[in-house]
Amino acid sequence: MKPIIYEKVLNWFDEHGRKNLPWQQNPTPFRIWVSEIMLQQTQVSTVIPYYQRFMQAFPDIRQLASANMDNVLHYWSGLGYYARARNMHKAARLVCSEYGGKIPTDLNTLVLLPGIGRSTAGAILSLSGDGPYPILDGNVKRVLSRFYAVKGWPGKSATAKKLWTLAEHNTPNSRGADYTQGIMDLGATVCTRSRPLCGQCPLQRECLAHVTGKEKAFPERRPKKIKAQKSTNMLLVRHRAKIYLERRPREGIWGGLYSCPEVESEDQIPIWIRTVFNSEVASIKAVSMMRHSFTHFDLNIHPFVVRLSIGQAAIPEELGSIWYEPGSMAKIGIAAPITELIRAITAE
């Protein structure tokens, strides 16, 4: 099998590839690592402002490792998939304690760190060190699947194995950084998911999907599943200008972030308020439902704005709960839907 992709990808990259992304300036392993974790399941245009703020707060791995987790989640809030931030923080601490603050340059060692898989490790090493390390992110899967007309959903192990073989076969021994960036750019800007710009693609003449007119057939889609529907009742407990928030468990959705407390039913609200605050309810107001979609299910949030009676017992501020003032400079992690919900009810 002749590796006929890389020369054309490199030529295309020289003329059309992206060369001014923030992480391409001074591409240290740490800077590339942060960008690659942020770019998982998130577009470049969305990531850039988050990346710039994050790097300003944590310019090197030691500062990230020594940071408070709440502060890390604060700068991650809005990107979603918060386990990525927790894993990166954990990995940064391991690098500092086990490797003297230097990210390993051995692929097999690098993939042992939390949150770093084979493709992410390859991207870190190739983009920061120019080495011949294959990657297989979503963009590369799409390019290879179409070019070679690879059958099967890439999420299946057998299909992924075929794609890894093709990725390894086409990765050149030199200009690893340019090739890696080039094939990612090609997938992101030309070989796009729904409307590929085949007329602008350097691979179109040999691309089996294009030659047979079956671009939309590759890569094969994930088998369809009906999304589960889940519901929750969230309380926006207000006292003067502040809102009561609780830290969520580290496992599960929005792990480690601050969120609104939840109850099983509206009837339980007065009981919950008396138990937690030793206070009575001044008012309860139901507001419009909010739906937030996760990968595997939709969460239907039924919010209730609850005001406490004036002059009641002291309001608790125990470990794992805070009184949050919207618009304050408090650096805590709050999931984007909760921030949106708070913004909506405080604007009324």
Image (cartoon, rainbow, N blue to C red):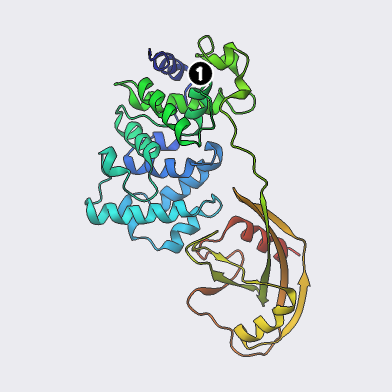
Is residue 186 visible in the rendered image? The answer is: no
Q: Position of residue 321 (x, y in %)?
A: 53, 74
The image quarter containing residue 216 is: top right
| Quadrant location of the N terminus in the rendered image | top left
- Taking the spot 49% from the left edge, 58% from the top edge, the residue there is 74
**Residue indicated by mark 1:** 147
Is residue 226 visible in the rendered image? The answer is: yes
Vertical arrangement, residue 269 with respect to residue 294, above or below? below
The image quarter containing residue 308 is: bottom right
Q: Position of residue 20 (x, y in %)?
A: 45, 30
* SS at badge 1: helix
| Direction from residue 316 to residue 32 in the image, left or right | left
| Direction from residue 342 to residue 176 in the image, left or right | left
Vertical arrangement, residue 83 with respect to residue 202, above or below? below
What amino acid type is highlighted by mark number 1? Phe
| Direction from residue 74 to residue 298 in the image, left or right | right
In depth, the one of 272 and 147 nearer the eye is 147
Q: Position of residue 170 (x, y in %)?
A: 38, 20
Mark 1 burial class by Cα count in 10 Å: few <14, some 14-19, many 20+: many
| Quadrant location of the C terminus in the rendered image | bottom right
- Taking the spot 60% from the left edge, 70% from the top edge, the residue there is 325
- Taking the spot 53% from the left edge, 80% from the top edge, the residue there is 317
Residue placed furthest toward the top: 205
Q: Position of residue 194 (x, y in %)?
A: 64, 27
In depth, the one of 78 and 49 nearer the eye is 78
